[in-house]
Structures are given as C-alpha cells and as structure tokens.
Amino acid sequence: MTGMTGWEPHADAWFLVVVLLGGYLYALSAWGPEHAPGRPAATRRQRWCYYAGVATIWLAADWPVKVLADSLFSAHMAQHMVFSLVSAPLLLLGTPGWLLRKLLSPRPVNALARVVTRPMIAFLIFNTWIVLYHWPVVVNLSVSNDGFHLLAHIGWMVSSLIMWWPVLSPLPELPHMSSPGRMVYLFGQSIVPTVPASFLTFGDGLLYHAYAHAPTMFGVNPIDDQQIAGLLMKIAGGFLIWGVITVIFFRWSVDSESGAPDRLYWRDLEPELDRLAASNH
C-alpha cells in the first residue's frame, strides 16, 4: 500500500487548516474587543465547535484519508461527506454572530449573501454542486490534479456552508427558518443525493476511470468500491441529516408544549446580545 507506511503531510490540507484556524484566532483577538465589548469574543462552546470543525477538515483531507481517497472512491466520498455534513455545520456553529456580520459587511458580499442564503436558493446551490461534482470528468480530474482537488474541497465547504445557513444562521437579518421549515428543508436535502447515489450503487460499469488502475487496497475492486461509495452517500448521509431533523423535532415539541418561542440552539440569544453591545458601543 503505497503511501500508507508512514505519515505524509499534504500541503492542501495544511493550507486550509492554517487559513481557517489562523484567521479565526486573529479575528477573535483583533476584532473581538471592538465588536463584543465587555464579553468574550466567542463562548467556550463556540470555540470548541469551530476547533472541531477545523479538526474534521484536517482529518478528512490529510494522511491517511487522502492516500485512501486516491485509490478508493468510497474514501473520496467519505471525505466530502465529512466536509459537508460535519465540518461545515461545526464551523457555522463556532463562528460568533458579530464575526459573521463583519465578514458579510462589504456591500457586494452582503447583497450576494442575501440571495444565496434563501432556503430555496441554498437548496439548489448545494444539490447542483453535488450533481456537477459527480460527473466523471470532474471526479477524474480531482483525483489526478492536486490543485483542482483543493479547489473542489473549497467548493464543497462553500456550498455546504450555504446549505446549512437556513438551518443554523444566528443573524436576524439573514435568519434561519422556523423549526417546521428546517425539518422540511433537511428532508429535501436527504432525498436529492439519493439520485447520484443510486447510479453509484446500482450501476453495472465503472463511472470514474481514474480509479480503474489505482492501487488495490483491502482487496476491494473498483466496482465494489463504487457501490460502497453509493451506499455511504445514501445511508450514512441520510442518517446524519435525519439525526439533525430528530433533534430539531424534539426541541420544537418541547418548546410547543411549554409555550416557549421557537428556538434554534444555544446561540439563540446572541443576536440580541450583539445588538445591545453595538448600541452601548
């Protein structure tokens, strides 16, 4: 198993980690006192969520998963499922509302965000990305060209952050949906990926010829590997999304019985805190 005998750091993975972690720490220290006066720039839970999001990106993009992904499409699929269903929501949960607001403050960026974070637009962007990425020419190029693979990883992260925004947004000016709306939205997200997953699971031929002559790992042939990838996309991806739907449902049920307003999660009060801090500042 070439490349599996010793640790081999991959530049693209470390580039993403340095940019994401370094930028976050700089923002909290340099901008935090201005935008969150009198209180921590980020809560402990926010920091841990963000650090966990960066850690999952590193684990999925660096050795040994990167080596496995060059030989097994199922590992390639697992990489992108981690990016889209684990890393992206953790990064969003870990970013304070004031920081998101500052990042989106340039007028062109804000105008674009107001369009792409609308639930239907976000839904279409993410699922269009899934369909386009799984074209054979795109996957084959991603496997053979490290520069393109880095761009693909960035594409997965950006489209996934957009997808999760209607579910996890802490900003009242770019709000999340109601609990019933979030459940319906995520239900749709669990259905659409089953289409390309079905082609992978039930296809008779090999779709991605970059894997035809890849080194065999664990005795898995390319066709079986392709079918495993389809099952991962259909079952594991659906399991993660339905787990989020279940959490939202039970919280909504508890809030409905108690007469409390519809809530999202532990950051619900943060926008109001941001407004208070800004008015005092």
Image (cartoon, rainbow, N blue to C red):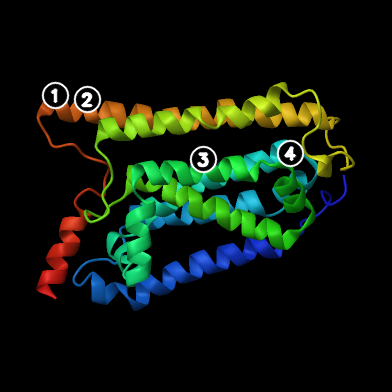
Helix, strand or loop for disc 4: helix
Disc 4 residue crowd, few under 14, some 14–19, many 20+, Cα 10 Å: many
Disc 1 residue crowd, few under 14, some 14–19, many 20+, Cα 10 Å: few
Q: Nearer the viewer, mark 3 or mark 4?
A: 3
Helix, strand or loop for disc 1: helix
Residue occupied by mark 4 = 73
Judge by depth and name the residue closer to the eye, 256 or 226.
226
Residue occupied by mark 1 = 257
The C terminus lies in quadrant: bottom left
Give amino acid for label 2: Ser
- Distance in Å between CA atoms under marks 2 and 3: 29 Å
Mark 2 vs mark 3: which is more N-terminal? 3
- Distance in Å between CA atoms under marks 4 and 2: 40 Å
Mark 1 vs mark 4: which is more N-terminal? 4
Judge by depth and name the residue closer to the eye, 61 or 137.
137
Helix, strand or loop for disc 2: helix
Mark 3 vs mark 4: which is more N-terminal? 4
Q: Is residue 201 left or right of residue 153?
A: right
Residue occupied by mark 3 = 127
Residue occupied by mark 2 = 253
Give amino acid for label 4: Phe
Above or below — where is 80 with respect to 172? Answer: above
Does the rendering let one see residue 9?
no
* Circles 2 and 1: CB atoms closer than 8 Å: yes
